[in-house]
Amino acid sequence: MDRLKCTFESRESTTVQPVSRKLFNIMSAKQSNLCVAADVTKSAELLSLAEKVGPYICLLKTHIDILSDFSTEVVEELKNIAVKHNFLIFEDRKFGDIGNTVATQYSGGPFNIVDWADLVTVHGLPGDGVIKGLGSCASGQPRGCIIVSQMSSSGTLTSDEYIKGCCKMAEENAHFVIGFVAQSNISKDPRFIVFTPGVQSGCTSDVLGQQYVTPRAAVLERGADVVIVGRGITKSDDPCSAAKHYKEEAFKAYQERITS
Ligand code: 5BU
């Protein structure tokens, strides 16, 4: 079974990973493979954005450490909004240390990420201790991670060899790994979900090395399952209609892919 040709619905039954199953289910039910990168610095902005884009997304991606007024209330509120609009929460923490350290970062500190984020990102660089460390904190809650295998930024050091290593790590830790952040079709395995950031229509880069492709190119040419859109939505005059537009574009491209 080739990942690119399978429906999200059919892929749900290829895995027992609880967060993958939930995400496939949401993507089919809401007809959305859009993740919004909510890179805002105030709690009120984060909650207001989540309410606006909630109906159109399968996932909301946070960088919780950029909030200047973080409190435990904001994540409680965010969880309520996620339930109301049926999306998952993804903290793009990019854990990249030894297992023991990431375990304490994940389940402690001011953010206690394991308590509220369904998904987090990890770097493959440390080896699979990073995954085992995070997995040891889940204590029965449905949690998972995504391996950053290839980045969208210019000059990224993620070589082919590195990508292969990340794929092997995913296969060996499939109880906790739900997929990859990537810019190309790095895995045919229908269990794994490929998330692609660096997506925006009508803009090809920013001034700090970010590189963009359109949602259509991400899905049809690069093999993205989920497109991650930040400023294309958050900086738009109307984030709600921008999210609706990106959702429709990305899902149409996915439908074309599975039927072509
Ligand atoms: P943008 O505003 O659409 O450029 O935001 C992209 C988001 O995706 C931002 O939160 C980044 O941290 C994140 N990102 C990325 O852009 N490229 C990568 O390779 C990875 C994450 Br991994």
Image (cartoon, rainbow, N blue to C red):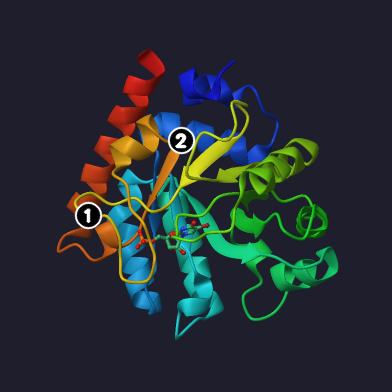
**Amino acid under disc 2:** Asp
User: At 72% across and 58% down in the image, what residue appears?
Assistant: 125
The image quadrant of residue 116 is: bottom right
Q: Secondary structure at mark 1?
A: helix
Q: Earlier in the sequence, mark 2 or mark 1?
A: 2
User: At 25% across and 36% down in the image, what residue appears?
Assistant: 248
> At which x and y percent is residue 11?
56, 24
Q: How packed is label 2: few (under 14 Cα within 10 Å), some, or many (20 or more)?
A: many
Left or right, residue 19 beside residue 5: right
User: At 32% across and 47% down in the image, what residue appears?
Assistant: 213
Q: Which residue is mark 1?
A: 240
Of 206 and 240, the residue lying toward us: 206
Find the residue positioned furthest to the bottom: 68
Left or right, residue 36 beside residue 170: left
**Amino acid under disc 1:** Cys
Of 91 and 188, the residue lying toward us: 188
Q: Which residue is mark 2?
A: 225
